[in-house]
Image: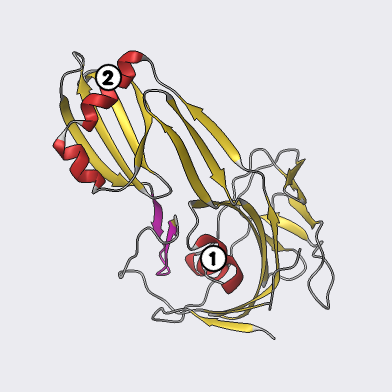
Amino acid sequence: MKESTKLVLAASLAVVVAVAAFGAYSLAPRGRPPSGGSATTDSLVTGSGGTCASTPETFGNMTLEEGPCVSYGFPSGQVAYATLESAPTHDYIRTAYGYQLLYFGTSVNDPRVTYAVLNVTGSQEVAGNWTTGYEVSYTGNRLLNVTLLQLSSSSYEVIHFSDYPLPDRNQSVSYSPDEVQAIDVALSDPQITSYMSGLQYYAEHSAPIQNATVNGYYVQFFQVDGPGTVGAFVNQGLTAVTSSHFQLRVSGQCWPDGYFIADPWSAVSSSACTTEVTTTSPAAPQQ
């Protein structure tokens, strides 16, 4: 049985998917095909152009041909929202640390069919401290293959969905004695601790900085498994913070057709960008 998902938005918009036919690429998922169907093997046409030799790239259990001079993007906010807010995709990205569109294409056989491949980073874990060093891990990583069929100007159906586990990613972070002192100075500043609001942060960056206006150290703290970032400029003598700022680790875009798309998905919201679209989804992921 298919599950219907009604997205809470405000108007119906027709969408014209403009695809530049500079090169054809094949997407070959190696998991089980959708129930009652066969695996998708249609040629894909890239969403943005360039003429260059393609090479096979493997993501999880999928292999696709990629052109090195091609970048991928959704053709409209409506297609992006229909893909990301469909029930199976949303289950993965709504609480994820972040996600990235690795591939987007349109079937050369049916322009109503679009393909998206998403790299999802599940969560972030941090151990250690700034004096001895950090071990940062990114876990619960998945690769999602989402195929949509446009049924009407504002209605889409997920005709294939598969997910593949990716290995954990690990990173070590350590600092010199002067960089550690810069972190200590930053953490002693009341404005910095106010920005952090009692949440868990770690020192993601500490290094000397020198330009026409700044001579000292720059320290950046990231919220653990969250979108907050705090930056501090510390003077050259390592005695005081000269300026600081807070911002969210968010990539957001308000599309002309009324959709707001954010990565991480749930980090921010926008009441200024509202539309309505319906996506129906398969009963369960196919692997």
The picture quadrant where one finds residue 177 is top left
Give the residue number, with chain letter if any, for mark 2: 181
Give the residue number, with chain letter if any, for mark 1: 84
Q: Secondary structure at mark 1?
A: helix
Residue 103's place in the image compared with 181, above or below, is below
How far across and how far down the image is residue 162, in percent?
A: 71, 63
**Left or right: where 217 falls relative to 42:** left
Q: Nearer the viewer, residue 69 or 170?
A: 170
The three-letter code of the residue at mark 1 reads: Leu
Q: Nearer the viewer, residue 200 or 251?
A: 200
Residue interval drawn in magenta: 250-262
The dot on residue 187 is none
Q: Nearer the viewer, residue 30 or 124?
A: 124
**Left or right: where 216 falls relative to 200:** left
How far across and how far down the image is residue 58, in percent?
A: 75, 44
Q: Is residue 159 visible in this depiction of the protein?
A: yes
The picture quadrant where one finds residue 275 is bottom left
Classed neighbour count for the residue bearing mark 1: other residues with Cα under 10 Å, few (<14), some (14–19), many (≥20)? many
